[in-house]
Amino acid sequence: MTTSVAFVDVNFNYTSSQPILCNVSMEVPANGYVCVVGKSGSGKTTLLRLVAGLETPVSGEVRLHTANGHQPSVQMVFQDYSRSLLPWLTVGANVALALSREILSPNRRQDRVAEMLTAVGLSGLEDRFPRELSGGMQQRVALARALASKPSVLLLDEPFGALDTPTKLDLQEEMLRLKGLMGFTVMHVTHDLDEACFLADSIIVTNMGRTTETIENTLAHPRRRLESRESPDFLHLRRRLFEKLGYV
């Protein structure tokens, strides 16, 4: 079950004098991986919050459409993993929080938690506490919790921004593997243009509260951390993004 996301003439602001989003219209296709890039204050995170239902447009509409009329399921992963995990709960209990609304037997709940931790490379760490894990491992726990409810839409707000480079590269490859395995739609906000070029099927460029362009990514799959970044398609797309954002 996959879900598409559409923004239709969306306007949003926190105060009347400071518009955040202006007449935004765009679509994230079902089972697509879309990255959103832009300078700070251009409304990137607000787009995610609108999809998650944490904010409501002043005007316009955000539409989530799932085939066969199923109810869409949305989960969000934030950049600050240290605040998103409850330190007094074990890793397993943190992941199980995502299942609180599902009617599952204790054994099935335990199996789902173990399945998700295995998927993110943390098998056997259910009884650890977050403080006993590295930053990268904590972010994997946050990702496992988001995936435990089997969402149709996964929202990522700079999830790897605070991690060291080797861990970030590992998790980028992990995201592509998990998406291929579980088949959800991804909307990913990032300041890292290399990350956007590596992960996305298409990249949305924002500027001053507007989505200025959607750029398709022709980089071939499967993607590898070194080979893909050395390819002409990657380098061309990266340069194009630098030019669009005025970084050159």
Image: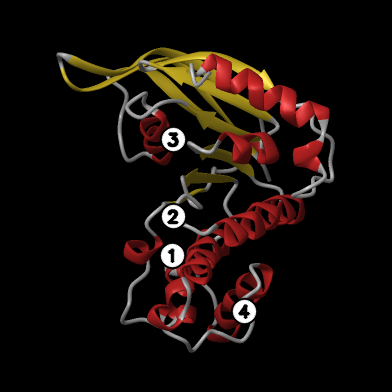
Secondary element under disc 3, as helix, strand or loop, is helix
Compare residues 58 and 201 and report the one nearer the observer.
Answer: 201
149 relative to 15, above or below: below
* Contact between labelled residues 1 and 3, with CB atoms less than 8 Å apart: no
Left or right relative to 205: residue 130: left
Amino acid type, residue under disc 2 in the picture: Ala
**Residue located at (44% from left, 79% from top):** 93
In the picture of the structure, the residue carrying the numbered disc 4 is 114
- Is residue 64 shown to the viewer in this render? no
Q: What whole-number distance in Å separates the C-alpha atoms at marks 3 and 4?
A: 28 Å
In the picture of the structure, the residue carrying the numbered disc 1 is 101
Picture quadrant of residue 90? bottom left
Q: On residue 51, which mark appears?
A: 3
Amino acid type, residue under disc 1 in the picture: Arg
Of pointers 3 and 4, the one earlier in the residue sequence: 3
Picture quadrant of residue 173? bottom right
Q: What whole-number distance in Å separates the C-alpha atoms at marks 4 and 1?
A: 18 Å
